[in-house]
Amino acid sequence: MTYVMSDLHGEYEKYIRMLRTIRFSDDDVLYILGDVLDRGEHPIRILTDMSMRANVIPLRGNHEELAEHVLRRLCVEITAENCESHLTPEDLDAMSSWLLDGGATTIEEFTKLPMDDRLFLLEYLEEFTDIEEITVGDSTFVLTHAGLSDFHPDKPLADYAPFRYGIDETDYETRYYPDKYLVTGHIPTLRISPEHDGRIYIRNGHIAIDCGATFDRPLGCLRLDDMMEFYVK
Ligand SMILES: [Mn+2]
C-alpha cells in the first residue's frame, strides 16, 4: 500500500502511533511531504527513524530548506579561535529567522548528536526531493510540499523552479490537472476550508494533508490505493 503524510513538525509520538495504526510494513511505501523539522520536541528523532527506512520517501519542506543551511554551519567544533569569525552576518540572519519559525527544538536535538550522526543526517536531508509523481491503481498523484511555481498543466515536473514561499500560493478552489491529483501539505486544512478542520481536504483535484498536527490537531495519513483516511490525536 502507498501512504502520504506531511508536516510532522517534531511530533514523534504521533508519527510512531500513525505507523502502528496503518500497520506500516516493509511491503508499503510512505511519502512524507516535508516539514518534519521544528516546533515539536523530537524532530531529529523522526528524521533519524525515517533515514533508517528505505520505504519512506522524503520530500523537502520550507523548514528543511531553512535547516539545511544553518545545520551545515553547526557541523564544526566552535573554538575560541573561530567563534567570532565562523558565522557570517548572513548565517546569523538565517539562524534568527529559522529560530522565529520554530528551529530551536531541531538545533537542540541536532547539536547533542555525535558529529558523524550530524553529517549523516545532513546528507540525508540534502537528498530530499521537491516533487514526485506516482501512479497508484488508476490514479496519478503529483506530490510536493506546498505547490507548483508558475503552474502549467503540460509543464514537465523537472522544469519547475523551487516553490517561492511568501510569493507563490496554491489556489485550492481551482483544479490544476484535469487527470491527476495535486497532493500538498504546508497549509493546515482548516485554513483552506473551516469545515475540514483537522481533516484531510479532497476537492477540485486537490488533496491537502496537513491537518495541523503541530497545532494540537490530529496527524492525518491517506492511503492512496483506496483513499482511506487515518487520524491519530
Ligand atoms: Mn511548510
Image (cartoon, helix red, strand yellow):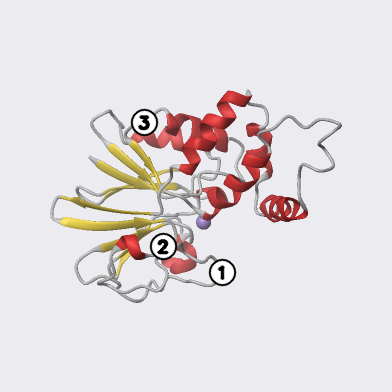
Residue sitting nearer the eye, 177 or 39: 177
Q: Quadrant of the N terminus?
A: top left
Q: Secondary structure at mark 1?
A: loop
SS class, disc 3:
helix
Q: Which mark is residue 230?
A: none
Spatial CA span between label 1 and label 2: 23 Å
Foreground mark, 2 or 3, reads 3
Query: What is the C-alpha distance between the residues marked 3 and 1?
Result: 36 Å
Disc ID at residue 166: 1
Describe the element under mark 2 as helix, strand or loop.
Answer: helix
Disc sitting over residue 196 in the figure: 2
Q: Which mark is residue 20?
A: 3
Nearest to N terminus: mark 1 or mark 2: 1
Left or right: where 108 falls relative to 40: right
Mark 3 within 8 Å of ligand 1, using the beta carbon: no
Residue 42: x and y in percent read: 58, 35
> Residue flagged by tag 3: what amino acid is it?
Arg
Q: Residue at x 67, y 27 (%)?
A: 112
- Residue at 59 percent of width and 30 percent of height: 118
- Pick the residue in front: 220 or 170: 170
- Which-is-in-front pick, marks 3 and 1? 1
Q: Tell whether label 2 touches label 1 (CB within 8 Å).
A: no
User: In this rendering, would 83 be left or right of 151?
Assistant: right
Side of 211 where 201 appears, left or right: left
